[in-house]
Amino acid sequence: METDPKDLVVALSTSVKELQQGLDLHCCLVTSLLEGKLDERHFQSLVDRCPKRSRERRLEKALREAIDVLEESRKSFKSKALEVLRKRLTEALIDPD
């Protein structure tokens, strides 16, 4: 499987843009802290970007995809175990703890 150089350039450009946005956010946060004016918008945005949050979002997306597949296959496979699994995954997404 060959990678198109244009796709690589787009991926790198996107990555650099995200890194720059992160640096800008950190600068705002440090400035706010030094000036004694912690801006909650910037703080929450930083928290949302932390690696754990990113991982949680990927896990949530994977769970939603698994639930969708189980839902679609529900009519083809009359499995009580798959139904229970689908419901438990759905509950895991809904339950905040």
Image (cartoon, helix red, strand yellow):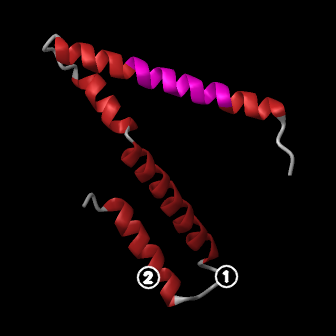
Q: Which residue corresponds to the image point at 19% horizontal and 18% vertical from the top-left? A: 33
Mark 2 residue type: Val
Front in this rendered view, residue 31 or 95: 31
Q: How far apart, in angstroms, are the residues tagged by discs 2 and 1?
A: 16 Å
Front in this rendered view, residue 16 or 68: 16
Front in this rendered view, residue 97 or 73: 97
Residue 11 lies in the magenta-colored region: no
Under circle 1, the secondary element is loop
Instruction: Report whether 50 appears left or right of 38.
Output: right
Per the rendered image, the range of residues in magenta is 12-24
Look at discs 2 and 1 and give the one toward the viewer.
Answer: 2
Q: Residue furthest left?
A: 36
Q: Residue furthest top?
A: 35
Under circle 2, the secondary element is helix
- Res. 36 image quadrant: top left
Q: Which residue corresponds to the image point at 24% horizontal and 61% vertical from the top-left? A: 97
Q: Earlier in the sequence, mark 2 or mark 1?
A: 1
Q: Which residue corresponds to the image point at 52% horizontal and 82% vertical from the top-left? A: 82
Q: Residue 56: percent from the left, percent from the top?
A: 41, 52
Crowding at dot 2, Cα within 10 Å, few <14 / some 14-19 / many 20+, comes out as: few
Q: Residue 66: percent from the left, percent from the top?
A: 55, 67
Instruction: Report whether 56 appears left or right of 79.
Output: left
Per the image, the residue denoted by label 1 is: 76
Q: Residue 23: percent from the left, percent from the top?
A: 42, 21
Residue 60, compared with residue 36, is above or below; it is: below
Crowding at dot 1, Cα within 10 Å, few <14 / some 14-19 / many 20+, comes out as: few
Per the image, the residue denoted by label 2 is: 84
